[in-house]
């Protein structure tokens, strides 16, 4: 039967379409609008739900490899874009994320067998997750969260902090490349121009089943009011106590290392120190000996005016100074220095530097009369966030009392604060530490719900 003219034209069109070179894909997962990002995430989740754990692990292995290969590039981009932090420390954070973020191994089922049959409980995905990420650890948080969320069968739409947009979008591209290499669809998405309004639209969407945020009090409050399952990683102001039993030399090195890491941007970093009077002078001397710069009370006041702004009786961080190198603050004060990592100053318990979370390599040191006062002042300065606290001591009673009083998610003993993230410490890594909602250091299981399957027949064999 001869073909009509229209049929011939259609065949020619199809052939030409198949022979035409494929249009290059832009940044995978990056969409023009948040609505499109949500639609794509929903489609991808339906595909991912049926993909085996083995294939998910293959994708995670790819993401780990790509993260290691791109650690320096992402670190440099993050510092350049946000104008915060230290390249060498951000490289270390990417290596940590690649090597110590858990995958599917967290998703362990449980089974009960008895006279009435078999009950199996498994971890199931929520579906599409809406996540907001910070400017302090932008690419690290995207990669870490995506590994856990994808491992448990979810897809995620990120709303990156606008000041770290490009770094975050590059990280989204990286994780999608790793997923595609394993035959998976894109697993992470974002609108190309994230705003606070786009996050509000995300959490209002019926497509979104879970909301995850890593940020300050405002975004935590918005997340918790979403009416959906929420995981919130909020603010912290971690204290560190040094008592008379501590190895002071090691404590001084550890405090400098932790408080200066990535210029004090990590939320777990030591933000203020409480030192017992009996070892106060010796500890200060050891901090200086190990490279910290002690500024005078007069220069401390000048430093306050430089990095804090006052409005209607309230004080706010001058964002220009968050996460800067210690030498830049000293340069602004006209103090000669030799590229120190940390500035220290003597302080009173209610000083602004003690009560405000600076996220700067500036550590106020408070003299405490005894361990009781040190614990009470530390708990006050932590403000009940229950985020992180640290202590250098060989006195088990002191360590126990502080841990019980602080009730923090992370409590680091006799090590730099970053040991709490698994960096030169045991345990897995995460950059979403959910104190307000109680999940703690999140992993793949945090992004799942429990599902129970019951077979009420006598299936046991013993």
Image (cartoon, helix red, strand yellow):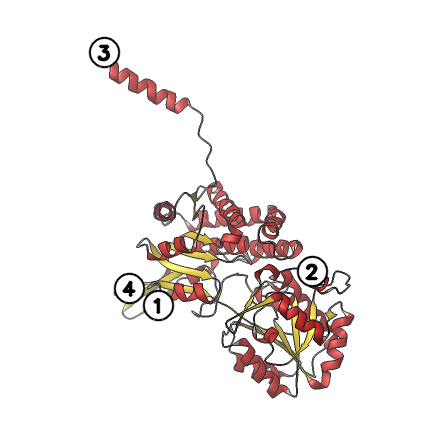
- Residue density around tag 1, few if under 14, some if 14–19, many if 20 or more, within 10 Å: few
Residue closest to the eye, 385 or 210: 385
The residue where tag 4 is placed is: 454
The kind of secondary structure element at disc 1 is: strand
Q: Are marks 3 and 2 in contact (CB under 8 Å)?
A: no
Could you classify mark 2 by the number of other residues whose Cα lies within 10 Å: few (under 14), some (14-19), or many (20 or more)? some
In the image, 111: left or right of 310?
left
Tell me the distance, in whole angstroms, between the alpha carbons under discs 4 and 2.
63 Å
Q: In the rendered image, which residue does mark 3 sit on?
A: 2
**Is residue 417 visible to the viewer in this orientation of the structure?**
yes
Picture coordinates of residue 129 (x, y %)?
Answer: 39, 55
Q: Residue 360's quadrant in the figure? A: bottom right
**Residue 133 screen position, x and y as percent:** 48, 57
Q: Earlier in the sequence, mark 3 or mark 2?
A: 3
Comparing labels 4 and 2, the label whose residue is closer to the camera: 2
Residue 153 visible to the viewer: no
Q: CA distance from mark 3 to mark 2?
A: 82 Å
Of badges 3 and 2, nearer the viewer stands: 2
The answer to which of marks 2 and 1 sits earlier in the sequence is 1
Choose mark 1 or mark 3, whichever is in front.
3
Q: CA distance from mark 4 to mark 3?
A: 62 Å
Residue corresponding to mark 2: 328
Q: Which residue lies most toward the top here? A: 2
Q: Earlier in the sequence, mark 1 or mark 3?
A: 3
Do the numbered discs 1 and 4 sit on residues whose CB atoms are within 8 Å?
Answer: no
Using a 10 Å C-alpha cutoff, classify the residue at mark 3 as few (fewer than 14 neighbours), some (14 to 19) or many (20 or more).
few
**Mark identifier at residue 162:** none
**Mark 2, secondary structure of its residue:** helix
Pick whichever of labels 4 and 2 is earlier in the sequence: 2
Q: Give how far across and how far down residue 440 sits, in percent.
A: 48, 68
């Amino acid at each position: 039967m001869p073909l009509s003219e229209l049929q011939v034209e259609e065949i020619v069109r199809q052939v030409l379409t198949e022979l035409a070179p494929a249009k290059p894909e832009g940044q995978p997962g990056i969409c023009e609008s948040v609505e499109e990002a949500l639609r794509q995430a929903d489609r991808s989740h339906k595909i991912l739900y049926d993909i085996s754990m083995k294939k998910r692990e293959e994708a995670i292995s790819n993401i780990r490899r790509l993260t290691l290969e791109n650690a320096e590039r992402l670190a440099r981009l993050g510092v350049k874009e946000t104008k915060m932090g230290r390249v060498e420390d951000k490289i270390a954070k990417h290596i940590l994320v690649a090597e110590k973020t858990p995958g599917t191994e967290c998703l362990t089922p449980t089974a009960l067998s008895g006279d009435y049959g078999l009950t199996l409980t498994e971890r199931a995905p929520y579906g599409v997750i809406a996540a907001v990420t910070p400017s302090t650890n932008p690419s690290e948080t995207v990669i870490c969260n995506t590994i856990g969320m994808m491992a448990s069968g979810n897809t995620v739409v990120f709303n990156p902090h606008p000041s770290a947009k490009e770094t975050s979008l590059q990280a989204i591209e990286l994780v999608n490349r790793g997923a595609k290499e394993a035959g998976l669809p894109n697993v992470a998405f974002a609108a190309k121009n994230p705003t606070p309004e786009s996050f509000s639209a995300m959490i209002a969407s019926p497509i979104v089943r879970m909301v995850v945020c890593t940020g300050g009090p405002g975004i935590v409050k918005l997340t918790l009011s979403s009416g959906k399952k929420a995981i919130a990683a909020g603010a912290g102001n971690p204290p560190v106590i040094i008592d008379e039993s501590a190895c002071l030399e090691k404590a001084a090195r550890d405090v400098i290392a932790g408080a200066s890491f990535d210029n004090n941007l990590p939320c777990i970093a030591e933000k203020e120190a409480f030192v017992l009077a009996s070892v106060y002078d010796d500890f200060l001397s050891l901090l200086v000996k190990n490279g910290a710069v002690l500024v005078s009370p007069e220069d401390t006041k000048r430093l306050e005016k430089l990095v804090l702004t006052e409005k209607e009786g309230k004080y706010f961080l001058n964002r220009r100074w968050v996460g800067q190198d210690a030498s830049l603050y000293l340069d602004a004060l006209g103090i000669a220095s030799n590229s120190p990592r940390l500035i220290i100053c003597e302080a009173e318990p209610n000083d602004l530097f003690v009560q405000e979370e600076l996220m700067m390599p500036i550590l106020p040191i408070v003299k405490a009369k005894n361990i009781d006062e040190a614990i009470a002042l530390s708990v006050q300065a932590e403000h009940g966030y229950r985020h992180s606290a640290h202590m250098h001591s060989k006195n088990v009673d002191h360590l126990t009392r502080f841990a019980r009083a602080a009730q923090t998610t992370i409590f680091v003993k006799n090590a730099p604060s970053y040991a709490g993230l698994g960096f030169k410490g045991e345990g897995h890594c995460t950059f979403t530490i959910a104190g307000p909602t109680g999940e703690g250091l999140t992993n793949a299981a945090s992004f799942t719900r429990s599902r129970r399957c019951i077979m009420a027949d006598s299936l046991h064999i013993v």
